Image (spheres, rainbow, N blue to C red):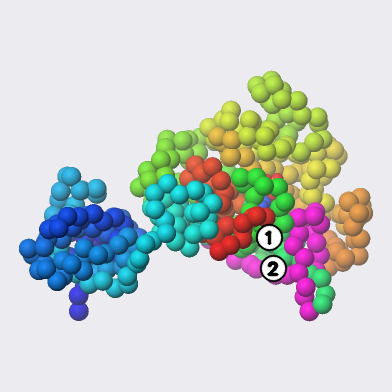
Amino acid sequence: MTEYKTVKEAMKQGSGKVSLQGWVYRERGSSKLKFIVLRDSTDIIQCVLEKDKLGDKKFDVADKVQVETSMRIHGIIKEDKRAPTGYEIAVEDFEVVGASNEFPITKDQSTEFLADNRHLWLRSRRMTAILKIRSTVFHAIDDYFRKEGFYIYHSPCFSPNNCEGGSTVFKVDYFGTPMYLTQSWQLYAEAGIFSLGNIYTIAPSFRAERSKTSRHLTEYWHAEMEMAWCKFEDILKHAEQIIKFIVQKVLENNQEELKILERDPKKLEPIVKKPFIQMTYTDALKVLKEKCNMDVEWGKDLRTIEEEKLTKLYEVPLLVTRYPKKVKAFYMKVDPENEDVVLGVDCLAPEGYGEIIGGSQREESPEEIERRLRAQGEDPKSYGWYLDLRKYGSIPHGGFGLGVERVITWICGLDNIKDAIPFPRTMLRFNP
Ligand code: ATP
Ligand code: MG
């Protein structure tokens, strides 16, 4: 049995016989000599095929090989400074596994064309680099919560309530009864802490976002946590620590990918080393006025443009706390020291990337929750089970939700969130 190595393993071996399997990344040649750059998930490597060595018949097959053909290649590897990745394989034999004729993606294609061919574009070095960083980020989130002793807990994706803003919820037909796709794991998670204490999940959330922004998907991966007996400061602490942990893991594991993406790691290093900046919403408005010449009326939520201007002033994330009660969800706890604001926090990524985490201490009083539900035109009766949680042994608790693609977009330095997920779903794009 032939032992196949990955491109990276073969380069590590550095000399002697190797067998590889992969796809043709590039090919060019003459009547006697053919160069194939072979790609696999680990890297690319130049392979040289000579007519004199392979014989006329075999060389003829090699000559017809096109981009994205899958192949097995056997040959001798050696260092070669001129080769794209510093190594070259002198091919002694090869097999074509799957032919590829006229691969549709060629140089300089439009963004729309690449989106239509997303299933093929995923193979690009750029998408491979992003997907590897995405994998590190998911692992890091899991590792973080596990090391902190959180249990994994799951909420249903079908919900009978259209919690938090009816306009952005997807309605589905559930055997004739209207149901809604979940926007957040949180409400059902609040039931889980009475059983498990501290819990987390990484699951899809669905939001019928009509705005065509570069940071909203209709289906995104949401890492959420909920803590029993927690203080507002605990939420801030975990928000800062998990972001530091994720960035540190990417810096440890993905230097090559950051290079492919032309993302300067120096921009990420302060995230691990320096403390995040905490400021209240009210102070954020002052900074916007003084440093950005932007007037935001107290009580208005920060818009994308304001978050962008604000976060461009700093090299580390901001933890903006104590937002006006009326712009935040009904379950956020009113600040005991100021009834106009809630104990909520948004973590805003630097360089203009904006919100990556939203969290809060949860309101404990059932009367206050009912009042706020009514104020936003909802019937508290449909939250009966949720209100029960405040009637039977209510405790101080809270948590946050982290938009995984938002974090990936920022870490990778992408212009648009669509590239942070293999098959993006937005209002206008849901194919393939
Ligand atoms: P925004 O104001 O940016 O729309 P939000 O206030 O609606 O965000 P939350 O309800 O607090 O967001 O959700 C928690 C986290 O989920 C956000 O901090 C963000 O990282 C992420 N998120 C929210 N909506 C989306 C979306 N449509 N696509 C991708 N990520 C999202
Ligand atoms: Mg939103």
> Which one is nearer the viewer's eye here, 234 or 401?
401
User: Residue placed at 80% from the left, 39% from the top?
Assistant: 324
Residue found at the very far front of the displayed protein:
31
Q: Secondary structure at mark 1?
A: strand
- Whether 87 is among the magenta residues is no
Query: From the viewer's perspective, is residue 344 above or below residue 44?
Result: above
Badge nearest the viewer, 1 or 2: 1
Who comes first in sequence, dot 1 or dot 2? 2
For disc 1, the marked residue is: 206
Three-letter code, disc 2: Cys
Q: Is residue 382 visible?
A: yes
> Which one is nearer the viewer's eye here, 250 or 292?
292
Instruction: Say few, some or many: other residues with alpha carbon within 10 Å of mark 1 (under 14 / 14 to 19 / 20 or more).
Output: many
Q: Secondary structure at mark 2?
A: loop
For disc 2, the marked residue is: 157
Query: From the viewer's perspective, is residue 214 above or below residue 115?
Result: above
- Label 1–label 2 contact, CB within 8 A: yes
Three-letter code, disc 1: Phe
Q: Is residue 132 visible?
A: no
Query: From the viewer's perspective, is residue 89 above or below residue 311?
Result: below
Residue found at the very far left of the displayed protein:
52
User: Residue placed at 75% from the left, 43% from the top?
Assistant: 343
Q: Position of residue 388 (x, y in %)?
A: 85, 66
> Which one is nearer the viewer's eye here, 311 or 167?
167
Q: Which residues are magenta?
A: 146-175
